[in-house]
Image (cartoon, rainbow, N blue to C red):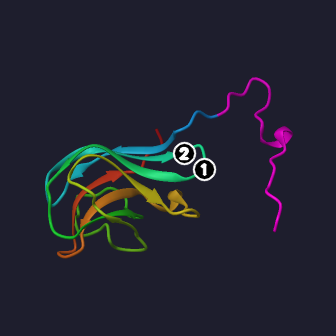
Amino acid sequence: PAEPLIEDPAISAPGPGVEPPVFPLTLAQGEFIGLAHSGTGTASIIELADGSRILRFENLDVDNGPDLRVILSPTELTDDDGAYDDGDFLDLGVLKGNQGNQNYEIPAGVDIDDFATVAIWCRRFNVTFNAAPILAP
């Protein structure tokens, strides 16, 4: 078996006067807007201490509907509720609930710079209920 990787503290430690990052680290954040349906809440992309990333919804309050999916979309924020599933969007799974706080795992290797918005998309009717921009905090 391969030996575990041991980090060299001289390489991984920050230089003098440089504070190490505090985890969880917010990489991006935006407020939901209503599109096909009303909705509010905050979407954040958060990096955890182990390097994994999650999409977190806080204070989510959106209308419920059939087959709602959480997607990351390359489309910039727009009031066109049909635009977010155009291009190479990333489906993070079924919306866990239409109210409250929730987390969605972002797969390793995904470049979040490829995406401009988070959207709650109804796959059945191909319409976006709500969207939030992905903005650096």
Where is residue 81 shown, x and y percent of the image?
Answer: 22, 64
- Number of marks in the rendered image: 2
Measured as percent of width and height from the top left, residue 76 is found at 37, 58
Res 72 quadrant in image: bottom left
Q: Residue at x 79, y 31 (%)?
A: 15
Residue occupying image coordinates x 43% and y 73%: 88
Residue 121 in the image: x percent, y percent? 26, 65
Residue 36 sits above or below residue 6 on the image: below
Residue at 48% x, 59% y is 106
Q: Is residue 8 shown in magenta?
A: yes
Q: Closer to the camera, 98 or 43?
A: 98
Magenta range is 1-20
Of the residues shown, which amino acid type is indicated by label 2? Leu
Q: Is residue 25 above or below residue 131?
A: above
Residue 72 vs residue 79: left or right?
Answer: right
Question: Circle 2 sits in a helix, a strand or a loop, which is it?
Answer: loop
Q: Marks 2 and 1: CB-CB under 8 Å?
A: yes
Residue under numbered circle 1: 51
Disc 2: which residue: 48
